[in-house]
Amino acid sequence: MFALDGGAHSIVGLAINLEGGANLVALFAQWGASQLILAVFYWLAIIRYRGLVPLMLLIVALEQGYGLGLDT
């Protein structure tokens, strides 16, 4: 679940042995950590606070839309 390179090389195939490779690994690690934190909030909303489910769906939609906007 936790790749040592944050998935930058083992999943995506980016060269991390170059200058700045540690920065790539740090970015992937931060991205993964934010996904884990959001997943905890999503499950909390689903299990305990069902009234927040529409808000969580909006957050997911905005996050996905933002990701699509970056993919130009």
Image: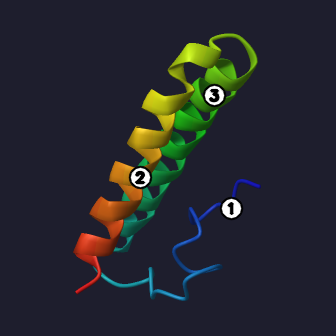
Going by the image, does 6 lie left or right of 34? right
What is the x, y in percent for residue 49? Answer: 62, 11
Res 3 label: 1
Q: Is residue 67 above or below residue 48?
A: below
Which mark is in front, 3 or 2? 2
Res 40 label: 3
SS for dot 2: helix
What is the x, y in percent for residue 37? Answer: 54, 32
Q: Which residue is mark 2?
A: 61
Does the rendering let one see residue 21? yes
Which image quadrant for residue 46?
top right
User: How would you rate the neighbour count of disc 2 (Cα within 10 Å): few for under 14, some for 14-19, many for 20 or more?
Assistant: few
User: How would you rate the neighbour count of disc 1 (Cα within 10 Å): few for under 14, some for 14-19, many for 20 or more?
Assistant: few
SS for dot 3: helix
What is the x, y in percent for residue 27? Answer: 37, 58
Q: Is residue 38 above or below residue 16?
A: above
What's under tag 1, amino acid-wise?
Answer: Ala
What's under tag 2, amino acid-wise?
Answer: Ala
Which mark is in front, 2 or 1? 2
